[in-house]
Image: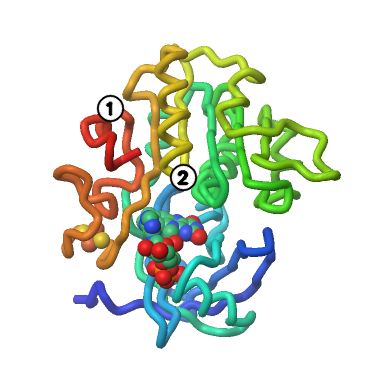
Amino acid sequence: MKNVYIPDIVTISEIREETPDIKTFKLIFKDKEVQRNFNYKPGQFIELSVFGYGEAPFSISSSPNQQNFFEITVKRVGDVTNALFKLNEGNAVGVRGPFGNGFPTHKFEDKNILFIGGGIGLAPLRSLINFVLSNREKYGELTLMYGARTPKDIVFKKEIETWKKHVDVHLTVDVGDETWKGTVGVVTVLFKEIEVDPKNTVAVMCGPPIMMHFVTKELLKLGFPEDQIFLSLERLMKCGIGICGHCNIGRKYVCKHGPVFTYKETKDFLETAI
Ligand SMILES: Cc1cc2nc3c(=O)[nH]c(=O)nc-3n(C[C@H](O)[C@H](O)[C@H](O)COP(=O)(O)OP(=O)(O)OC[C@H]3O[C@@H](n4cnc5c(N)ncnc54)[C@H](O)[C@@H]3O)c2cc1C
Ligand code: FES
């Protein structure tokens, strides 16, 4: 039996700069058989090792429809991410996974979807949005509310433009600059710009805990049922597979039972969860 702690080797086949401190890495398993069998759902994550530096969890940002490679989008914050940013195309890293539950896309069918992202939190939502767009007929109206710190910090800029054909996109930045003609303010200011019917809409969000806290409050005020609000959570992780106990919220492990939870499941742990 395979040792779950031993990563498979992947090659970095492309690196794209999204913002001054965020890059997207296109990854391909060295072993073609492993690549063929690497099936994942939007919202799942991998544990990535930069050899000699350590391992950290990252959401898969590509859509499962891409079968010959997968992508992660990473913000440089500490040891592993700084080491990753020093690597070049052609270098190798280790990958374990995919882990976690991912978004329950079957529950979103026939419904409108309101995607809400903040900063690097758009990474798992990008996977979901592209998955939904490639199965467009199964879903209702699509709306995206996304906020970044400044215009320079907006990720997936070109792709967001292409989404606009099918998705009602609303962007905001905390601090504008001379190039920015759009909305300024935190993500919740965008609620004024959109119209949603809470009875037939699911809200799916990922972003900083403070953003998810205020967005959830607003969604509840609008009348969204607690089990129609989906949050992708982050916790400090080690094993990624429900063994070490590092990532618990209440009795659940974010790595194994999450990272996607409904508000109904997490509300008793509100202080720690959002
Ligand atoms: C399920 C999941 C999915 C993730 N997806 C992404 C992604 O798509 N892109 C991305 O850039 N990052 C993502 N992260 C966050 C990423 O794993 C951390 O930023 C990781 O710690 C980076 O490793 P590092 O060694 O560079 O930083 P470290 O040296 O470990 O940490 C840098 C700083 O961040 C703090 N920190 C680390 N992890 C967390 C955390 N989970 N919550 C709060 N504070 C933390 C540390 O305490 C430290 O202050 C995800 C995390 C989880 C749990
Ligand atoms: S990271 Fe070990 S239990 Fe979740």
The relative height of residue 76 versus residue 8 in the rendered view (above or below) is: above
In the rendered structure, find residue 208 and report the number of the disc placed on it: 2
Badge 1 or badge 2: first in the primary sequence: 2
Find numbered disc 1 in the image and state the secondary structure of the residue it sits on.
Answer: helix
Find numbered disc 2 in the image and state the secondary structure of the residue it sits on.
Answer: loop
Kindly identify the residue that appears in the image at 69 percent across and 42 percent down.
175
Q: Amino acid at mark 2?
A: Pro
- Image quadrant where residue 255 sits: bottom left
Q: Nearer the viewer, residue 267 or 174?
A: 174
- Image quadrant where residue 134 sits: top right
In the rendered structure, find residue 212 and report the number of the disc placed on it: none
87 relative position to 94: left or right: right
59 relative position to 181: left or right: left
CB of residue at label 1: within 8 Å of ligand 1? no
Q: Nearer the viewer, residue 2 or 82?
A: 82
Task: Tell me residue 114's x, y (percent).
Answer: 53, 28
Q: Amino acid at mark 1?
A: Lys
Task: Tell me residue 257's x, y (percent).
Answer: 25, 47
Residue sitting farthest toward the right: 178
Task: Tell me residue 135's x, y (percent).
Answer: 56, 36
Say whether residue 38 is visible: no
- 3D distance between C-alphas at marks 1 and 2: 19 Å
Kindly identify the residue that appears in the image at 22 percent across and 77 percent down.
3
Kindly identify the residue that appears in the image at 55 percent across and 27 percent down.
188
Say whether residue 197 is visible: yes
Which quarter is ligand 2 in?
Answer: bottom left
CB of residue at label 2: within 8 Å of ligand 1? no
The relative height of residue 137 versus residue 40 in the rendered view (above or below) is: above
Kindly identify the residue that appears in the image at 25 percent across and 55 percent down.
247
Q: Which residue is mark 1?
A: 264
Looking at the rendered image, the quarter that the N terminus falls into is bottom left
Task: Tell me residue 5's x, y (percent).
Answer: 26, 75
